[in-house]
Image (spheres, rainbow, N blue to C red):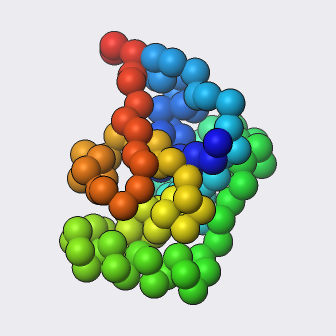
């Protein structure tokens, strides 16, 4: 099983907010997720280390021509923001399930998408 984690899924995982553990799978993140995670302006050194450790345990997928072309198509069809279109295109081109809680992405029919259950705050 192959799973692409959206940025919000990674943040929920790192914060211990998932109500169920992630399944056994091969995990991937888009290079866009890597950039989003590491570019938060108020990130402290400890949290940056935690993020980098997590990123070392997953496969980071760089942009390819196929991913770029798919992102263009998804962005046009669904009017997605560029980072979202690139993350969706990554999952689509890997034929992987996308784990996200981004409401706009949950209804895309071209790929399998799973919403994550969160612990009550």
Give the percent coordinates (x, y) of residue 12.
47, 32
Q: Is residue 31 left or right of residue 79?
A: right
Residue drawn at point x = 44 percent, y = 77 percent: 70
Q: Is residue 31 left or right of residue 58?
A: left
Kindly give the residue lying farthest to the top in the view shown.
120
Q: Quadrant of residue 26?
A: top right
Viewport quadrant of the C terminus:
top left
Viewport quadrant of the N terminus:
top right
29, above or below 115, in the image: below
51, above or below 19, in the image: below
Count of residue discs: 0
Q: From the viewer's side, name the closer residue of 17 and 69.
A: 69
Q: From the viewer's side, name the closer residue of 61 and 49.
A: 61
67, above or below 4, in the image: below
Residue drawn at point x = 57 percent, y = 86 percent: 65
Res 8 seen here: no
Res 95 seen here: yes
Give the percent coordinates (x, y) of residue 66.
55, 81
Q: Is residue 50 left or right of residue 95?
A: right
Give the percent coordinates (x, y) of residue 43.
55, 46
7, above or below 94, in the image: above
Residue drawn at point x = 61 percent, y = 28 percent: 23
Residue drawn at point x = 51 percent, y = 18 percent: 20
Q: Quadrant of residue 35?
A: bottom right
Give the percent coordinates (x, y) of residue 58.
72, 48
């Amino acid at each position: 099983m192959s799973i692409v984690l959206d940025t919000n899924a990674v943040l929920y995982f790192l914060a211990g907010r998932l109500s169920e553990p992630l399944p056994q799978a091969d995990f991937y993140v888009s290079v866009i997720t890597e950039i989003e995670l590491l570019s938060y302006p108020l990130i402290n050194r400890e949290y940056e280390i935690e993020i980098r450790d997590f990123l070392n345990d997953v496969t980071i997928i760089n942009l390819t021509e196929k991913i770029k072309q798919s992102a263009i198509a998804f962005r046009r069809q669904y009017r997605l923001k560029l980072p979202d279109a690139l993350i969706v295109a990554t999952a689509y081109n890997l034929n992987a399930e996308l784990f996200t809680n981004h409401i706009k992405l949950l209804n895309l029919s071209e790929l399998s998408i799973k919403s994550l259950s969160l612990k009550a705050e």
